[in-house]
Each structure stands twice: as C-alpha cells, then as structure tokens.
Amino acid sequence: MWYLCVFYHRLLDFRKPEFESLAHLFGAFGENRSSHDSVLQWRLPKDHHPNSPFHFVHFPSEELARKLANRSILVKGIYELWGEGYDYEELEEAVKSYPDERKLPYLGSESTFKITVDSFGKVLSLQQQNERIEGLSFIPFKGRVNLKNPDHNFWLMETDAHETNNGLPPVVQRRIFFGREVGGADRKFIPMYQLKTRNYLGPTSMDAEMAFLMANQAQAAPGKLVYDPFVGTGSILVSAAHFGAMTMGADIDIRVVLDGRGPDCNVWSNFKQYGLPMPVGLLRADNNLPPWRPGLKEVFDAIICDPPYGVRAGGRKSGGRKLLKGIIGPYTVPDDKRADHIPSTAAYTLVECVHDLLDLAARMLVMNGRLVFFYPVLREDGSAENHFPEHPCFKLVATSEQMLSSRYSRVLLTMVKTSFYTEELALAAKIKHLEFKENHLKWLEDGTLHSSVFSPSDAESASEHQIAIIARTKLAKPFEVRYSAISARTVFELFLGAPVTIRVVLSSAKFANATIVSGSVAEEVSIHQEDMAKMPSRYACIRKS
C-alpha cells in the first residue's frame, strides 16, 4: 500500500538511507530480508522537487510502517493518504472518493480524534488553521475531539507555491494533503542526549542526532553486539545502547578508556547518566594492531565509528617515530613503571586507518553485519568525489554526505558484509600491513601515500593484471611468481622466508638486473622490462635507480 511519508527538512542525504536501513531491520522485504539489493518503491508528489519533505512510499503493512516511523530520527510522520489536491475543492472531491471501507472504521462515535494543521514553506496563523479545520466539515466525524490523547490523529498539510529558491525546494503549485497518521518519530529524547548536557566530552564527540542516525544505519537493536574501535568519549555507543544493543569499544589512548577525567567523568559515567546498560568492555587497543586471537571471526553484528581524519584530532598508532624509523629497537616496560606508563604512538594516516578498519570489519563482522563510518572528501566543483574505499567482503549500500564547508565534507558510508573472510584476503591484508610498515615514511615524503592505499577490489580482480616475474637464483632453478596487488619485495620475502632488500639497476633494454639481499645471502634476479612496465605504479615498491 502507498503511504505519504513526510520527512523533517534537514540532513537531506540521510533521509532515505535511514528509512531503507530500518525497513530491512523490521523485515519489510519478507524472505528477502537478507538481500540488500531490495529497495522500497518511492515516488514524488506532482510538481515536487526531489529534496521535498513529501514522498510516497510503498510499504507492505501498516504495522511495519508504524514501527519504522516510531524508530526513525528523520521521519516526521507516515500517513494513510485520504486525498490530495491543488485547492480545497479538489481535496474535498478526492477525500469523498476515497473508499468508505477505509474511512468509516476511524469515524465512528466510539472513537476520539484530533486534526492538526501543518504547513511547509509558510506560517499559518491560529485563525487560518481554525478556518481550514472548519472547511473539513464534509468529513462525517462522529466521535469526540480529544487534543491530548486521541485514538486517531488526522493531518491537514499544505505546501506553499514558491518557484524562487529561498532555501526551500521549489514547488510549482500549492499542494494540499489530508490523511490519517500511522506513526511518527518521537524526537523528544534527542534534547536529553545533547552534548551540552553530556557528562564527559571530547573535541570529537559525535553530535547526538548524528549518532542516532548512525545507529539506525547499523540497525542497532536488542540482542546485537555493536563495536566502536575509536570509542573516544562513547557518543556512538551511547546511541546504540539507547536502542537496546550491547556495546563494546576500544581506543588507543589508555587514559580515555581507563578513567577519563576522574571516577565520575569518563565513558562509563556517560552510560550511567542516561541509565543505559554498561558496555560489555572497553579496551586499550590499537586498530593497527588488533588484539583478537588468531582464528577469532564473526563476533560483532555492527561496527560503527568515526575514524580520525586529522581535522580536530589526528590518528595515532603504536610505536614512536624513532621506533618506526629503526633508530631504537623494541623495548619492554619495567614492571614498576607499567601502572602509569603511556605507550608511545606515531602518526596514523587515514589511508592506513581505513585499510585496517575494512580488514577488521571483514574478519569480525557476522554475515550481513554492517560497517558504518564517516569518510572525509574534498569537494571539487561543488560535488564530492565518489571514489570510496572498497573491499570484496562488503557491498556499499548507502552514502550520505554532510557538508562541513564549501570545500570539505564527510560522507557516511554504510557497508554490508556479503561474503566470508578468506585466507587469501587475510594474506593480502598481512602483506599490505608489511608494505605500510616499510614504506609509509617514504610515501609521505614522496606525496604518494594516497595512491598506495590498498583497494581490496583489486585483489579480487587480480587476475586481470597479474604479472609474471621470472627470477633466476643460484639456490634453485628459475621460478615464476604471480604478482597480484603485492609488492615485488614482499613476494620474495614470502618465497625466501626472511626479510629481503631489493636493489634494481637497469642494464639492458629488456631486463632489469636486481639484487635480492636476504640475511647474508645475495641472489641475482632478472625482471623483464615489459613486466616492469605493466606493474601498477601504486603497487610497485621497486624503484629504478
């Protein structure tokens, strides 16, 4: 059945994705509930702009529509439309022609009702509202009026005819709607969660409304376990806990997860402030070095986070600059200093952070679990770039842009896990970790870090650009290595079983002579020039000298 859905006129890019996510959560697609290709049918009222708050949506049942409207943050109401028109004469004709079997159950003398007049694009005085209610006398209401707690709510909604763009979607002609309310969002709890009243805050605490939208996109619900690997002050987990989900978080800063600003001002106190169930656990963990034991998979139902992208706070990972550069070796903290020890950290670029996040989600999410996170973009020519991170385990089902300035914005990406995490993907991720560890400083200096990001979709389609590297060694007969989204350095590391150094010197028009140094053994190899030329530049770690 078709219903009239009226959205709040805010966060326009987030409206339909939230609605679709909740439709999947409440089983609107029946047997296809796990099929994320299923989408609802939408259509616009006549002469309305796509950004209009008024949309028609086809929903399988009124009960599901009520559940969705009551849970949503951006749906003002869902209505069974009795009639619409350009003027009140046309509206009266439409309402009278609506089937009596659909109207009469709500017009009986045993029920109470209330009529609300609303407008979009203009303000109606109290007198004008009363005049419009009196104009509905053609509807045979027999029940009593109850303004506080009626059995049935009816809405008369009117749009203004404004062709000029005054900040509102243009409407060519006035449109009037009349219908019975099926359900509506209860946004009264949002002010209670506003950051200005929050007990424990940080510079990157997520706005309450946005946190609830993220939780809806992730389908947080009772019985589900939600994880935030960048928990900070816990704003996102608070919203997930509000919807009944179990929560768990991690942060690299031990001061955040341990005691915050004191025993009564920390992440735990935020949950206590709202009477929410405490998190299952808060870990001091590095997203670059996940703490999960080998073989542990498919634990979380959803991962929701706001990765650090260096606007208000930059990302950090374990290991100081001297440690990463090899100036000093790994060290052990003495037992007498461990209680107050704060581990050294180094810069953690967004590229590496997103790669690690996708690998974590692919490993730890259950099938059909959701990964919801913000991704910053640079707006060029007034539009955001549409090149987003990819992974063969995930399908991108929604993108919602939030503009931060005329040049920058961030996009909320919603991904659904559609395939299992395989050993091949684990190997590719491990190899990329080694590449980041060895080359991130050089990539930063060269300005090529972003082009070196691991795009797992390339690993999936590696057969399209696999390159044969023919190596001649003294220890074995010539062998062939398939080059697939892996640096040549790492290929030989895997083959020889030890860290290697590769030096390449061009000696002829056809072959590049390379010296592989593994421990104290140096081996000569030859790599065909044509193969070298075919290597994708963003993967190549061999540099011509």
Image (spheres, rainbow, N blue to C red):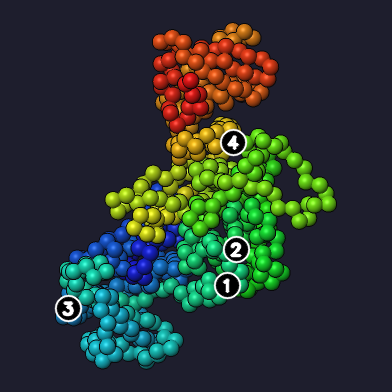
Closer mark to the observer between disc 4 and disc 2: 4
Q: CA distance from mark 2 to mark 1?
A: 10 Å
Q: Earlier in the sequence, mark 4 or mark 2?
A: 2
Decide if residue 30 is in sight here. no
Q: Earlier in the sequence, mark 2 or mark 1?
A: 1
Residue with the most extreme right position:
336
Q: Residues within 10 Å of mark 3 (few under 14, many from 20)?
A: some
According to the picture, the residue beneath numbered tag 3 turns out to be 87
Q: Amino acid at mark 4?
A: Lys
Q: CA distance from mark 4 to mark 1?
A: 39 Å
According to the picture, the residue beneath numbered tag 2 turns out to be 233
Q: Quadrant of the N terminus?
A: bottom left
Q: Residue at x 35, y 63 (%)?
A: 12
Secondary element under disc 2, as helix, strand or loop, is: loop
Query: In the image, is 522 to the left or to the right of 133?
Result: right
Q: Return the residue nearer the eye: 462 or 184.
A: 462
Q: Amino acid at mark 2?
A: Thr
Q: CA distance from mark 3 to mark 1?
A: 47 Å
Q: Return the residue nearer the eye: 151 or 187.
A: 187
Q: Earlier in the sequence, mark 4 or mark 1?
A: 1
